[in-house]
Amino acid sequence: MRGVLSRLGQTLFVLFGISVLVFAVFFATPGSDPSARIAGRGASEETIARIRHEYGFDRGLVARYLSMMDHLFLSRDLTSYVNHGQNVVAEVFHAAPVTLSLVSWAALFWVGGALVTGMLAACFAGRWPDRLLSGLGILGLSVPVFWLGEMVNLLSQSRFHDTMLFRWVPALGYIPPGISLTGWAKCLILPALTLSIAFIGIYGRILRSDLLAAMQEDALRTARAKGAGPVRLWVFHALRLSGLSVVSLFGLDFAQLLGGGALLTEVVFALPGVGHLTYQGLSTLDLPLIMATVMYSAFFVVIANVLVDGLYRLLDPRIGSRSGTAARGGRSHG
Amino acid sequence: MDDALLSIDALRLALPSGARLLDGVSLRLERGRILGVVGESGSGKSLTGLSVLGLQPRGRLEGKLAFEGQDLLGFGPGDWRRFRGRRAAIIFQDPMTAFLPVRRIGAQIAEQIRLHSLCSRREAETRVIALLSRMGVPAPREAARRFPHELSGGLRQRAMIAMALSCDPDLVIADEPTTALDVTVQAQILMLLREIGARRAGVMLITHDMGVVAQICTDIAVLYAGVVVESGPAEAVLRTPWHPYTRALLRAIPPMDGARPDRLPTIEGTPPAPEARPPGCVFAPRCPERRAACAFRPALRRHEDRSVACVLYP
């Protein structure tokens, strides 16, 4: 219980630190006038003066920070000054489910794909299936996601759209699951696959080497001596031992994607997610929007880290008794 | 024709590179006996034990390896799966790394029971607790729910033995079961092994500790560089060792009484590397009794109940 509380305290502290840092970068950089930047290019003097007063830029730093946090989290009425009057917080909340859907589908594909390719490659280590998968993995890693996305679009949306293969693909864009569950799945399958290709490559390789290392452990020799068959050996013993490093990596990547890392995929497939929103904010220098998306992503990265730590404790009982950081690097060979 | 529980004859294990790890291991183990397999590190003791379960890490086995008259070298993967854990089980040296660190002790023992017999999770659990308490584990119900790192070394080794005995195997191979433990715990573990030997199972005890052999073994086989050079009843071999290597090995143990020698006698030289083995007797290069006949490998000859591979005993 004490561990949970201290963990919660740490989390809040980290979030506070991030908010201060982001605030400082955008609104307290010396020599720049934040009100002019919020107002956007070519705004009138009156607008700038009004913003200056509204956000408290004529007051001290602490008061400004507090009012910013109030606009962002409490009254949630921070408005964009590029698209005049648009509520930024609401926009992020509209975009979040899109990104969450896309990334969850992608995670499903990449975990499944990595399990299959990693297992196969490890079982056939050094033989042709291993080499083939290794080559495909490197190919998947090196293909840029925007190019792959465009190619997928080219095939599924125009060239072969009317063939049996791609007739089911809906037009680019997002269909919320509330409107049509099948439509939601259909519009996300190809983008999620595109996004997951590189991850399947990385995770498959990592899993392969972890599995092979685990097979050399004394514990696996014991399992063989017990009379365990190959499936039990690979799945219940080797995979159980080697899942740990993949889990921590997965947590970080998943959080990073939720926080806008799926930007390119979202833009290519015209999905109005958080990455898309960040892209929009960056291209128009819409500071309130950037502020909101950055805070949102930081929040998700931190939350995901907490979840991964919890999962880690469940998966590896040794961690509770040792210091958590020492065991995170990987399996101990002591 | 052969009523032995385990009968190994001229067993060889060679790597594809040509290096010979085992080069003529011959031994017999009968039910109710405890066979001590001794030798220095690298002599192939553990490898012999692992080979009986088909667990040798690399290389191909040749020769004869029979379990109750059944040829183990002809086993397929399915035969091995039914054999391992059920008919022959192994106790590893280091119970810390031998258990899966991320699963509870009880679950790991129950896994072996459920691999070899049709029983429910509950039945397996009851059997695990009964086994642990038979091994002298205090509070067996709680111990079964612990993870390996939460138990002491002695308790872990007891759990390991409980796992090995869980399916009532006919043969138990104990690979240096007491090396990682302190002396008082060692004695308790040896008592357990002796009880197994009394239960009509055969025990193959792999050790480098002559004291352990003298305490509990009924028979002994001395390994040098992958070759069994001498075997026989433990008492006779320990009292009057025949092979020069066994003699040297026993001389290197400090005497229990009398004046302590300033220096213990050592064996000159080092054992041959697997790639560069002498063509004749493997011990000849270090042997004080070396003669011309040693250029040819002496066979392991029987002399009543003992066997020795040395030209001194034709």
Image (cartoon, grey):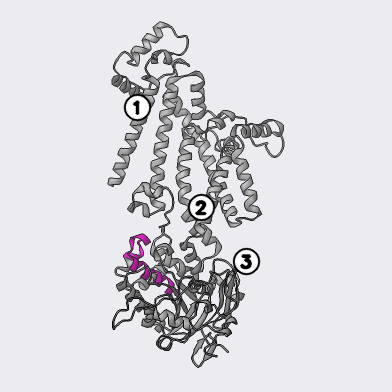
Q: At label 2, which amino acid type do we have? A: Asp
Q: Is residue B292 above or below residue B163?
A: below
Same chain under badges 2 and 3? The reply is: no
Q: Residue at x 41, y 19 (%)?
A: A79
Looking at the rendered image, the disc whose residue lies closer to the viewer, 2 or 3, is 3
- Residue B252 seen from this side: yes
Mark 1 lies on residue: A20
Residue B22 in the image: state x and y as whole percent: 55, 74
Q: Residue at x 37, y 62 (%)?
A: B148
Q: CA distance from mark 1 to mark 3?
A: 64 Å
Q: CA distance from mark 2 to mark 1?
A: 39 Å
Residue B288 in the image: state x and y as whole percent: 48, 81
User: Given the image, what chain letter belongs to the residue carrying mark 1?
Assistant: A
> Which numbered dot is residue B16?
3
Under circle 2, the secondary element is helix
Under circle 1, the secondary element is helix
Answer few, some or many: residues within 10 Å of disc 1's Cα (few below 14, many 20 plus, some between 14 and 19): few
Residue B53 in the image: state x and y as whole percent: 52, 73
Q: Which residues are magenta?
A: B142-167
Q: At label 3, which amino acid type do we have? A: Pro
Mark 2 lies on residue: A210
